[in-house]
Image (tube, rainbow, N blue to C red):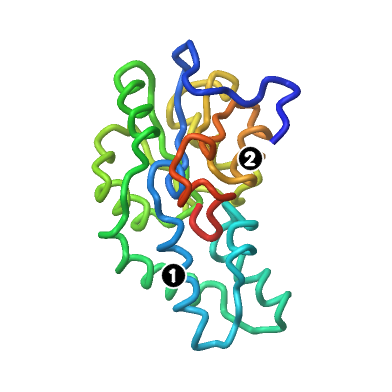
Amino acid sequence: MKNPDGFLLPLPYDFVPGAAIFDCDGTLADTMPLHYQAWTASLAPHGVPFAEDMFYEWGGVTTRDIVLRLNALHGSALDPDAFTHAKEEAYALLIPQVKVLALIEAEVKRLHGKCPLVVASGGLRPIIESTLDTIGLRAYFDAVVTSEDVARGKPEPDIFLRAAERAGVAPADCVVYEDSPSGLEAARRAGMRAVDVRPYVAPAAAVAGNAGTG
């Protein structure tokens, strides 16, 4: 992503933000292969293909919105709400395999106690909280904002604006940590600065984003 206006920050940066807001999947947790595994297993009975490159290209888009896109692309008739439930159930079985992304974990611990920390994910709350528990970071965060808390998902700014509200900090004073193009665009629209974590995390999680994960 080009950075003509100083929107993107390098790691490490030399100040303490008013609040730090972290995406979960692909940012805090290396969940990418597991989410794709859940997608393919859930779609197989319906005969609906979902190419891996498309999965990454649609980084940060909610599961429900991806189902709508797949229906339009393939002429399928998946029920968005029912399929979202089935896919998240499939993914939930894989959560014990999730690993933390160490460099971003270090950022959480570096900033803990210095500013409010908030998770802002387009995923479902039970899944995100279970993921945070599995990687051992839940206790570091002052709040968790998920898709249930906003009307519009990324790339709209709603989830980050709600996170800033929960932190009690002006959006302009927040720094967002994100791995997806739609998440970075949401941070930009929210008037925040951001860290694109992709250059800093392991290759398995540093591809392009996390479709249907948040």
Callout 1: 10 Å neighbours few (<14), some, many (20+)? some
The quadrant where residue 172 appears: top right
Residue at the image point whose x is 53% and y is 60% from the top: 212
Whether label 2 touches label 1, CB < 8 Å = no
**Residue 136 against residue 116 in the figure, above or below:** below
Upstream in sequence: badge 2 or badge 1: 1
Asked whether 84 or 110 is in front, the reply is 110
Left or right of residue 185: residue 113? left
Q: Nearer the viewer, mark 2 or mark 1?
A: 1
Residue 5: percent from the left, percent from the top? 73, 21
Q: Quadrant of the N terminus?
A: top right
* Residue type pointed to by label 1: Gln
Residue 96: percent from the left, percent from the top? 25, 59
**Residue 80 against residue 61 in the figure, above or below:** below
Residue 165: percent from the left, percent from the top? 49, 30
Q: In what element is the residue under mark 2?
A: helix
Residue that protrudes farthest toward the front in the picture: 203
- Numbered tag placed on residue 37 in the rendering: 1
**Residue 107 against residue 80 in the figure, above or below:** above
Residue 191: percent from the left, percent from the top? 65, 27
Q: In what element is the residue under mark 1?
A: helix
Residue at the image point whose x is 67% and y is 77% from the top: 71
Alpha carbon of mark 2 to alpha carbon of mark 1: how far? Answer: 26 Å
* Residue type pointed to by label 2: Ala
Asked whether 197 or 160 is in front, the reply is 197
Q: Which residue is mark 2?
A: 186
